[in-house]
Each structure stands twice: as structure tokens, then as C-alpha cells.
């Protein structure tokens, strides 16, 4: 098993990166989220890999963190989903968005991935929902993206977190999906004492740009 490859980013193509390490160029299939976060060609990079050996050949799939790779391998446990299907899902949804879709039962968001129908998306939710901690997923999704204005005091953070959660629920009640709502809320620059209404208004502005 190749757990990771650490080397120089040599080339980038659609859905594929080439990393040179010890004189060898490794072609690694990656989701769209990885392509958008790559350093310039020639820079140092570390990719966490999944080694796939099938009757069709040998492939490497890569991710920027062990947690994202774990989400990929979790998808492979779903009946009917292989490495290419899992990569397609993670190209349509970031790992954080996918986790949110699973714990909230938002199969519609998952079905937007190429080649994934409604039944397959529902199967992903059904088979993986109990494997994820909903509270941890929700907290992680909202924590990502907080900038310099994020609260640091524990008590204040708890209050703002509760307001964030209510804002997401309000957006869902307005007809937005759980994924769309959480994306919009986590883009809000938080400050201590922000109310649900303030977060909601800022989130609605963000939805115009999603």
C-alpha cells in the first residue's frame, strides 16, 4: 500500500496530477477540489493516496488530507460504487459538503454527481449515515472558512455556533438544500455577539454567488 507521495508537482491535467519523487513520475487521479488547491507546478506537494488494483489495471487516487482519503474509502464500501464513481462524487461535492449531505439525508445533492442516480445517492445516505457523527460533521463544516473575525472565546463561540445552526435550519425551511445552506453560512465572517438574523441576512447574500 502506498500511503502518500511527497515530491514535486510536475504536471496537472483534468482530474490528474503528476508528482515526481525519487526520479519517478506518479500519475494520480484526483477530485476537482484537489485541482483547485494545488500549488504552482515545480512546488513541493504531499498527496495521500489510495492504491487500486482491479481487472482493468492499477491506479492511484489522491487527496490533500488523510480525512478526505478516508471519505473516499468510505464511499467504496457502498454497494455499486467503485473508485471512479467515488471520485466523481468527490468532484461534485467537497468532502465537507458530502459529509453534510449524508448526515442530513440530502441525497439530491449527491445525485448531481456525474453517473450517480437517485437510487445510488439514496444508498450512499442509507449505508453511510450511521458511520458519521452528525454533531462533529456540522461543527466541522461551519468551522472551516472562519477568517480573522472568528470568535475565540469558548462561551461566545458556543453562542455563535448555535446561531449558525439556526440560520442553516432557517435557510432549509426557505427551500435551500442542507449543503447549500451550510455553504452559505460558513462563508459568513463571524464576530462575537452575531444574532441569527444577522447571520441569515449575510448568508442570503452569499447564496447569490454560490
Image (tube, rainbow, N blue to C red):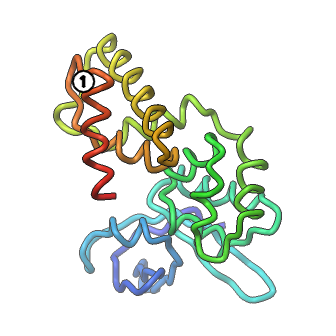
Question: Which residue: 45% across, 86% down?
Answer: 25
Question: Which residue: 42% across, 77% down?
Answer: 21
Looking at this rendering, what residue extends furthest in the left direction? 148
Q: Quadrant of residue 154?
A: top left
**Quadrant placement of the N terminus:** bottom right
Q: Position of residue 130 (x, y in %)?
A: 74, 38
Of the pair 74 and 185, the residue shown nearer to us:
185
Of the pair 24 and 130, the residue shown nearer to us:
130
Q: Position of residue 120 (x, y in %)?
A: 75, 64
Looking at this rendering, what residue extends furthest in the front direction? 174
**Quadrant placement of the C terminus:** bottom left
Residue topped by disc 1: 151
Looking at this rendering, what residue extends furthest in the top direction? 155
Question: Which residue: 29% across, 26% down?
Answer: 197
Tally of numbered tags: 1
Q: Is residue 47 left or right of residue 126?
A: left
Q: Is residue 159 left or right of residue 62?
A: left
Say what secondary structure mark 1 lies in.
Answer: loop
Q: Position of residue 101 (x, y in %)?
A: 58, 48
Q: Is residue 168 left or right of residue 119?
A: left
Question: Which residue: 40% across, 87% down?
Answer: 13
Q: Is residue 49 above or below residue 186?
A: below
Of the pair 150 and 194, the residue shown nearer to us:
194
Amino acid at each position: 500500500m502506498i500511503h502518500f507521495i511527497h515530491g514535486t508537482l510536475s504536471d496537472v491535467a483534468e482530474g490528474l496530477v503528476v508528482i515526481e519523487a525519487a526520479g519517478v513520475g506518479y500519475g494520480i487521479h484526483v477530485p476537482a477540489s484537489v485541482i483547485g488547491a494545488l500549488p504552482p507546478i515545480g512546488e513541493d506537494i504531499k498527496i495521500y493516496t489510495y492504491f487500486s488494483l482491479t481487472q482493468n489495471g492499477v491506479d492511484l487516487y489522491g487527496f490533500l488530507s488523510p480525512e478526505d482519503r478516508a471519505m473516499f474509502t468510505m464511499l467504496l464500501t457502498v454497494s455499486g460504487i467503485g473508485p471512479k464513481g467515488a471520485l466523481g462524487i468527490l468532484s461534485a461535492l467537497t468532502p465537507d459538503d458530502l459529509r453534510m449531505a449524508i448526515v442530513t439525508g440530502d441525497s439530491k445533492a449527491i445525485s448531481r454527481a456525474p453517473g450517480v442516480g437517485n437510487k445510488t445517492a439514496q444508498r450512499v445516505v442509507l449505508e453511510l449515515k450511521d458511520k458519521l457523527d452528525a454533531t462533529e460533521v456540522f461543527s466541522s463544516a461551519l468551522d472551516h472558512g472562519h477568517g480573522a473575525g472568528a470568535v475565540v472565546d469558548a462561551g461566545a463561540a458556543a453562542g455563535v455556533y448555535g446561531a449558525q445552526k439556526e440560520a442553516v435550519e432557517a435557510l432549509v425551511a426557505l427551500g435551500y438544500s442542507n449543503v447549500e445552506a451550510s455553504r452559505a453560512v460558513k462563508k459568513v465572517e463571524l464576530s462575537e455577539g452575531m444574532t441569527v438574523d444577522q447571520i441569515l441576512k449575510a448568508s442570503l447574500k452569499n447564496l447569490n454567488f454560490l
